[in-house]
Each structure stands twice: as C-alpha cells, then as structure tokens.
Image (spheres, rainbow, N blue to C red):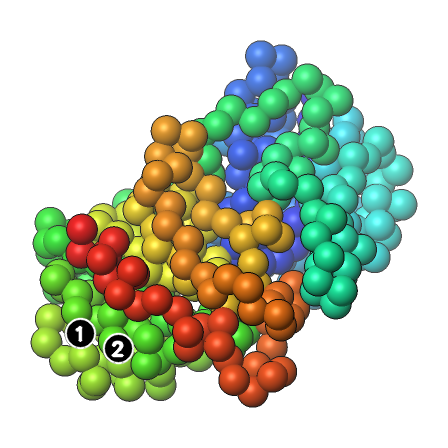
Amino acid sequence: MKFLILRFSSIGDIVLTTPVIRSLANDKVRKEVHFLTKSNFKDTLLHNPYLNKLYTFEKEITEVIDELKKENYDYIIDLHNNIRTKRLIANLRKTTRTFNKLNYEKWIRVNLKKDILPKVHIVERYMNTISFLNIKYDGEGLDYFIGEEDENVFEKIGFQRELSYFVFVVGGAHNTKQIPNKLLIDIGKLSQKRIVLLGGKGDIENAEIVVNAIGGDITNLVGKLSLNETAAIIKYCDKVLTPDTGLMHIAAAMKKEILSVWGNTIPEFGMWALLPENMKNRNHIFEVKDLRCRPCSKIGYDKCPKRHFNCMLQQDKNAIVEILNN
C-alpha cells in the first residue's frame, strides 16, 4: 500500500506528524510512505529513514502534481486540511483521510473562554487519521533525524559537544509567544551552566541584547546555523528553555529535558512538548494561570492586545531557575 501524507507548514507541525510516518512504516503490512510539504521545510524530514520519498513545492502544488499522479497512491493522509490540500485531493482522486483541525473548538476557547477541546495531544488526533488501519500511537514520542554533516557544526563553531550546557531558545514565530528578553536575562544570570542561544535570523537583535546583559559563559548562535545544525546543538545539550515554538518540538524529538514557557497560547490546544511515555516527568510547563485574557489567540500577535503582556511578564522565574539548575 502506498500513502501520501500532506503537511505544508510549519517546522513544529511537521515534526508533530512524525509518529504517523513511523507508525505507517513500521506496520506489519508493508507500506510505502511519501510526504509532501513546502520546500523551505524539507530539512525537517530530509534524513527521516521512515520516508520512501519526500516531495516539495515552492509556491503551488501544480509544480509536483504530475509526479504525484504517476505514483497511484492508495490513500492520501491530509494532515493540513485547507483549500490547497482539497484542490490537490480533487486532482489525485484517491481515497483520503483528513485531520480535524478543531478550528471551531479553538475559536470558542479563545473568544468565549469556554473549554470544549478534547484533552488529547495533537499527535493522537493525527493518529486518528490512520485508525482505520488499526494502527495506534506507539508512545515513543516524536522523531527528528540529522546527518553527519550537521553534527560537524561543533567543529565549525569551535565548540566541544562534550561540554555541559543549556540551550535557551530566543524568538519565535509571533512576539506574544516569545520569552521576553528580560525574563531570559534574569534566568540566564542565575544559570549554573554555560548557555547556548539558538534562534533564527530575525532574532539576532534580541540575542545580542541578552548576551550583553548576561555576559559570562554564553555562546550566541542565533541566526548562524541551519535548521539541522541547530538540531545538532540541541541533541547534545542538557536542558532546553523554550517558548511554544518549533525548536520545542525538535527538543522533544531529541528526548531532551524541556522547560517550556507559555505566553498567549496554551498547552490545552494539544501541542505541548511530547516526550515518550517513560520520560513525561522531564517536560516542565510554565504558564501564568487564571489570566482572563488568555489565550488571546491560537497562534499569536506582534503585540499583546491588552498591552500588559502579563502572560509572560508574570512568569515565576524562580521556579524556572530551580528546575533548570536542579
């Protein structure tokens, strides 16, 4: 049987699909698994051994639709579920199982503050799309694979992987999901180990502010590495301090101890750091409970709509430091 999985964005969302890929590939009935995503996310799955083929497109699915038609898939697993995937499915004319994004339930939670969301992780909901095959989630968490060339990053930056260090993730897709500079600085000043800052090119300015304020034993790699080189740095660290972002899910896939700090979004949306069943106690969630304005969005904003940003500025930094240094 041949399957095509659809998920076009983002890094974190694609990492969260990896249990579906693994479960299909490991099923007792041999299955061929293909994946379609946007080209700027291909590194996320580039080294995944459970995939037979990885298809990508730059702007429109028409770039690859002729190739996909030749594959003659048995099933399409639509984990993206938008107009673009519906157009593709209409063209391929194959049996499809589609992921329920729970947009209505999330809208109710954000706008009416009424919780009707299912109490399950999004991975379990992804897995429901292949439940017709009698395949269940194996409890092994997420996957992320890198190549030997990515692990050479330590030589590239002149840093010994044997050193004991914490990773602090700077930035995120939306400002209201990011850990504020002041909180990173306050925690960093109390860190008992070397700190390595990771983030994208858009986070360089904030990283420099954090480095200058903390001083001491800190390495700033923000905006200097590829995605998979960044994953290599995470692979060998001791703990990861991160907001709700893609690097949080990569850290979970690397089976790291995670301290996740939540701002305008909430774990109840089903996207907390998913570790294997026997490692759940290594996932530490920090959030300011009982704020009437939270969650203010299922994704995020450039600025706090209420202008106070209490969901981040009122975080218990002492509790974070205690677990970080434990």
Q: Residue 67: percent from the left, percent from the top?
A: 73, 44
Q: Nearer the viewer, residue 232 or 178?
A: 178
Residue in the image at 21% along x and 85% along y: 213
Q: Is residue 1 left or right of residue 11?
A: right
Above or below, comparing residue 315 to residue 88 in the picture = below
Q: Residue at x 62, y 72 (%)?
A: 293
Examine the rendered structure and indicate whether residue 274 appears above or below residue 314: above
Residue 124 locus on image (x, y percent): 61, 35
- Disc 2 packing (10 Å; few <14; some 14–19; many ≥20): some
Residue 10 seen in the current view: yes
Secondary structure under badge 2? helix
The amino acid pointed to by label 2 is Ile
Quarter location, residue 305: bottom right
User: Image point 35% across, 66% down: which residue?
Assistant: 316
Depth check, front residue: 9 or 127: 127
Residue tagged 2: 185
Q: Which one is in front, 110 or 37?
A: 110
Left or right, 171 with reference to 290: left
Q: Note whether residue 224 is visible.
A: no
Q: Is residue 135 left or right of residue 139?
A: right
Q: Residue at x 41, y 74 (%)?
A: 314
Count of labels shown? 2
Query: Which quarter of the figure is the N terminus placed in?
Result: top right
Q: Position of residue 296 (x, y in %)?
A: 64, 71
- Vertical placement of 180 versus 150: above or below? below
Kind of residue sitting beneath label 1? Lys
Classify 276 as above or below 159. above
Do residues under tags 2 and 1 come within 8 Å of each other at their CB atoms? yes
List the residue tagged with mark 1. Answer: 189
Q: Nearer the viewer, residue 238 or 270?
A: 270
Marks 2/1: CA–CA distance: 6 Å
